[in-house]
Every structure is written in C-alpha cells, then in structure tokens.
Image (cartoon, rainbow, N blue to C red):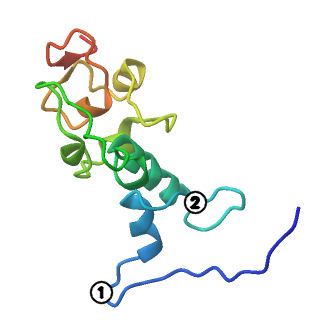
Amino acid sequence: VVLQPRALAYVYLPNGTFANAEIVRQGYGHAYTRFPFRYLDEFRRYEREARMGQRGLWGARCGDAAPERSAGRRTATARAGGSGALERYDDNGNGRITCAEARRHGIAPVPRNHPAYPYMRDADGDGVVCE
C-alpha cells in the first residue's frame, strides 16, 4: 500500500453550510469509510438518502431518461424532502423500512400519507403497508 500525502479539510461556506456534507447529501460525493472520522455516520446517512433519491452520482446516466414511477408512489424529489422517517424507523440502516421495524415502532399498518411509506414496499399497491 502506497500512502500519498494529502491534506483533508472540513469546508464551511460563508452562510455556515458544511460543504463536505452538502456534496454527499446532493449525491456528488460518497462517505469515505476506510478511516473513521467525526462525521462518518452523518455522511453514510446522506449517501444512503442520495442513493435512494437517485441524486447526483446515483441518478440516471447522462442521456438516459429518469426511471418511471408508478402513479401511487412519491417521486424521488418528494422523498428527499427530509421527513426524518428513515432515520427514525430504519433500525438496521439499510435504507428501507420493513414491516418488522414498523411494528416495533408502533406505526403499522402504514398508510400512503405516513412519512415512512415511501421507504416501504407496498406489494399489493393498495396504499397501505403491513396491513
């Protein structure tokens, strides 16, 4: 292994925005996990949300159309709105909320208008998960 000298820095914009985190949140960077750092968990969460929202690096390839969404599902943009449901109910951090997790948190059955719904699989498409 050849280690190359380099300087790493946390960058804050004049308005207080944490630029490093914003780059990952928008999907234009990823959480470098080889060495632990102060914001590792936060960056992993931002990366997971960017992947799920198909933003930046995780979006459609240049020239490809964005994936189609069925009428009953919220768009990636709407999911990226930041309800906090994923952080609140996704116990194992896999980017999805299972029925077991929903039951453990006392939110099942989960209707379409619940903040957790976009992170769940409505197999029968009836607008209610874990019924």
Neighbour tally class for label 2: few under 14, some 14-19, many 20 plus, Cα within 10 Å: some
Give how far across and how far down residue 87 sits, in percent.
Answer: 39, 45
Q: Is residue 46 above or below residue 102?
A: below
> Label 1 belongs to which residue?
15
Q: Quadrant of residue 96?
A: top left
Q: Residue at x 39, y 68 (%)?
A: 22
> Label 2 belongs to which residue?
40
Q: Quadrant of residue 51?
A: top left
Q: Earlier in the sequence, mark 1 or mark 2?
A: 1
Give how far across and how far down residue 93 sits, in percent.
Answer: 49, 39
Task: Give the alpha-carbon distance from disc 1 to disc 2, as whole Å.
Answer: 23 Å
Q: Residue at x 23, y 10 (%)?
A: 131
Q: Is residue 25 above or below residue 70?
A: below
Q: Quadrant of residue 99?
A: top left
Kind of residue indicated by mark 2: Leu
Give how far across and how far down residue 108 sits, in percent.
Answer: 27, 20
Q: Residue at x 27, y 26 (%)?
A: 107
